């Protein structure tokens, strides 16, 4: 429960309603505080025209912002629907967390409420002359803020929800997760070892779900408290169910340990997330490519763009693996992330759906060669296996002899790197 609450709180800034609420409360406070701030200013300004026109300006702002909010919401909903149909529904979570769209909508809503509160205060005689002047200058500042936000929002609309934008968002989220896993091998714990036969398994006590987060610090604390060693058997992204152990406890008193503190350190939810699950990001990228390669869409250019994005993600992972951080847990043995699984999640699925498309197969072999040559110790074996797999799938569909020879030559280059 504690881990679920911590993750919910950490995700609050990604929620549209949370940021809109903060902006709205700030706008209401600014409008209400004008009457209090006025008497604190010793200088009495003679701006009767400004103070008298503030009501008209606020009325214009309120009416225009209501229309802008409705337009913005319709644009965002349309973009979400377009992303679902053209890319994959798994990209919606990243679009919902977009900072610029949230800031725009929150600013528009905050301005609307600022205007409404100001109009109500003016109608009720809440402001004196100095309060009206303060409200006028606050309104000018709001107009400047709205102008900048509108310009930024218009620029955002030119790319929001487009294919390149979606691929870029998934690439960024995937790179972040891969970089973390590269810097923290075994989730920041000790390398996996053979689990003792007398080790006590700890399974989840809820319905089936997907592991989305593992609090290694809490696992270490629980292990020190009970004097046991933890052998973590799952990592984020794995499907778990009551019969599948989450971890094993070894030690003299392992059988008498309360398993609940260890369960509480592992968050199981209904859906996968990008936060600690690098394989999920690669799966989503491959889904975008698969949708583009379907006969209904027939867009190999998008699949090629996805392959280049995936290549950059693997490069970031390799660079992070070159300089890992020291393990932070001494009593916890974490699972290893297999590069072969990463290749299967990404390359093999695109090779399957693009088996008959020569340019896609050529780009697959080129990306695999780049990884094998750049980081042979990490990728050469898995790149060679993926290259053979992609070639075998292509030979089942491609019949032109020149294309076949070209793909065989490209695949042989990848294989040669492993055999050196």
Image (cartoon, rainbow, N blue to C red):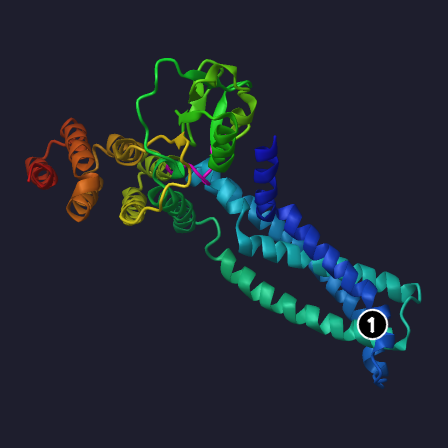
Residue under label 1, please give it: 37
For the record, the magenta segment spans: 271-278
Q: In this orientation, does residue 67 appear?
A: no
Q: Residue at x 35, y 13 (%)?
A: 197
Give the quarter of the figure containing the C terminus.
top left
Residue at far right of view: 125
What secondary structure predominates along the stretch shown in magenta?
loop
Q: Position of residue 389 (x, y in %)?
A: 18, 29
Q: Position of residue 90 (x, y in %)?
A: 46, 37
Q: Is residue 318 above or below residue 284?
A: below
Q: Residue at x 65, y 55 (%)?
A: 106
Direction from residue 67 to residue 6 in the image, left or right? left
Q: Residue at x 10, y 41 (%)?
A: 417
Q: Is residue 387 above or below residue 139?
A: above
Q: Residue at x 51, y 56 (%)?
A: 157
117 or 60, nearer to the observer: 117
Q: Position of residue 112 (x, y in %)?
A: 73, 58
């Amino acid at each position: 429960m504690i881990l679920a609450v911590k993750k919910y709180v950490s995700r609050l800034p990604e929620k549209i309603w949370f940021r809109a609420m903060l902006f709205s409360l700030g706008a209401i406070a600014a409008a209400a505080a004008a009457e209090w701030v006025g008497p604190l200013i010793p200088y009495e300004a003679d701006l009767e025209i400004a103070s008298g026109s503030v009501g008209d300006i606020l009325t214009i702002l309120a009416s225009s912002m209501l229309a802008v909010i409705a337009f913005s919401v319709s644009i965002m909903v349309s973009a979400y629907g377009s992303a679902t149909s053209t890319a994959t529904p798994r990209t919606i979570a990243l679009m919902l967390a977009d900072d610029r769209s949230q800031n725009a909508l929150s600013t528009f809503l905050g301005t609307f409420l600022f205007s409404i509160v100001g109009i109500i205060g003016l109608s009720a005689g809440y402001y004196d002359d100095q309060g009206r002047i303060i409200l006028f200058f606050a309104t000018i500042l709001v107009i400047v803020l709205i102008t900048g936000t509108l310009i930024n929002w218009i620029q955002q609309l030119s790319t929001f929800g487009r294919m390149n934008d979606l691929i870029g968002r998934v690439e960024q989220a995937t790179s972040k997760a891969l970089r973390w896993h590269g810097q923290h091998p075994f989730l920041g714990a000790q390398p996996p070892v053979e689990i003792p036969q007398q080790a006590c398994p700890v399974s989840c006590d809820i319905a089936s779900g997907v592991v989305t987060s593992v609090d290694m610090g809490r696992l270490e604390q629980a292990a020190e408290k009970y004097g046991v060693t933890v052998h973590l058997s799952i990592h984020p992204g794995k499907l778990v169910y009551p019969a599948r152990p989450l971890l094993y406890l070894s030690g003299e008193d392992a059988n008498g340990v309360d398993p609940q503190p260890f369960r509480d350190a592992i968050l199981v939810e209904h859906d996968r997330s990008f936060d600690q699950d690098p394989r999920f990001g690669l799966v989503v990228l491959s889904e975008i490519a698969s949708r583009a390669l379907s006969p209904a869409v027939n867009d190999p250019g998008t699949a090629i763009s996805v392959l280049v994005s995936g290549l950059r993600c693997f490069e970031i992972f390799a660079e992070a693996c070159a300089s890992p951080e020291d393990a932070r847990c001494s009593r916890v043995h974490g699972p290893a992330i297999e590069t072969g699984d990463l290749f299967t999640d990404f390359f093999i699925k695109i090779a399957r759906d693009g088996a008959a498309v020569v340019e896609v197969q050529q780009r697959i072999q080129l990306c695999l060669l780049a990884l094998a040559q750049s980081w042979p110790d990490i990728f050469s074996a898995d790149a060679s296996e993926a290259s053979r797999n992609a070639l075998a799938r292509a030979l089942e569909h491609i019949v032109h002899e020149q294309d076949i020879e070209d793909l065989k030559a490209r695949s042989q280059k990848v294989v040669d790197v492993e055999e050196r």
